[in-house]
Each structure stands twice: as structure tokens, then as C-alpha cells.
């Protein structure tokens, strides 16, 4: 079982916090969960998309027991580089 809080940080990063991971009732050590959380948070950093010309922001994040609602936007610079004819 894995649980964590998810929040928006500065509109450019989704960040997990307060992770709790257990297997068959035994909780994982904090060193393992914090290391995993750091790696996951790096993947959820939207600023890394800037390198490929994509600007993305999360304006609102709402989590419920059975749903996730995200409001945001993305803008692509030089969008034709992502199309089939853009590699010419």
C-alpha cells in the first residue's frame, strides 16, 4: 500500500509529500520512501519540458477519494517540430 499527499508548487511542479509505503503491514523505512519521493518529484517537475519548447502550468489541483481534477495549460514553441513534416 502506498499513500502520499499531492500538491502544486509554484504552478510548475506537482509535488508528493508525506509518503507512507507498506507491504504486508510492514512500513518501509523513511530513507527508502524519501529517496523514492525525491525521484518522483523530479519527474513531476514541469519545468523540464521547457527544454523541448513546452511551457506547462498547473493552475488548480483537486484530489478526491475517487477522482483527480487538474486545471492547467500548455503552450508549445515551434510546434511543427513535433509533427511528421517538422523534421525536414
Image (tube, helix red, strand yellow):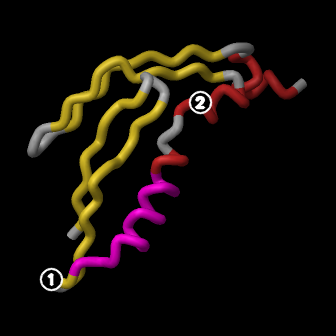
Q: Quadrant of the C terminus?
A: top right
Q: Quadrant of the N terminus?
A: bottom left
Of residues 87 and 21, the one drawn nearer to the viewer in this rendering: 21
Of residues 73 and 15, the one drawn nearer to the viewer in this rendering: 15
Q: Earlier in the sequence, mark 1 or mark 2?
A: 1
In the picture provided, is 70 more to the left or to the right than 42? left
In the picture provided, is 81 more to the left or to the right than 16? right
In the picture provided, is 9 more to the left or to the right than 21? right
Vertical relation: 25 (above or below) 12: below
Q: Which residues are magenta?
A: 27-40
Q: Which residue is mark 1?
A: 25
CA separation in Å, label 1 and label 2:
37 Å
31 within the magenta span: yes
Horizontal and vertical percent position of residue 31: 42, 72
Q: Residue at x 38, y 67 (%)?
A: 33
What secondary structure is the stretch in magenta mostly built from?
Answer: helix
Q: Residue at x 44, y 24 (%)?
A: 10
Vertical relation: 29 (above or below) 64: below
Horizontal and vertical percent position of residue 44: 48, 42
Vertical relation: 22 (above or below) 79: below
41 within the magenta span: no
Horizontal and vertical percent position of residue 30: 35, 71
Crowding at dot 2, Cα within 10 Å, few <14 / some 14-19 / many 20+, comes out as some
Q: In which quadrant of the rendered view does residue 54 lie?
A: top right
Q: Which residue is mark 2?
A: 47
Amino acid at each position: 500500500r502506498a499513500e502520499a499527499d499531492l500538491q502544486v508548487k509554484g504552478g510548475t511542479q506537482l509535488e508528493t509529500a508525506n509518503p507512507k509505503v507498506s507491504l504486508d503491514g510492514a512500513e518501509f523505512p523513511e530513507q527508502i520512501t524519501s529517496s523514492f519521493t525525491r525521484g518522483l518529484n523530479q519527474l513531476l517537475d514541469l519545468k523540464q519540458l521547457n527544454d523541448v519548447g513546452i511551457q506547462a502550468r498547473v493552475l488548480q489541483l483537486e484530489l478526491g477519494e475517487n477522482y483527480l481534477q487538474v486545471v492547467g495549460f500548455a503552450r508549445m514553441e515551434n510546434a511543427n517540430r513535433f509533427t511528421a513534416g517538422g523534421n525536414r
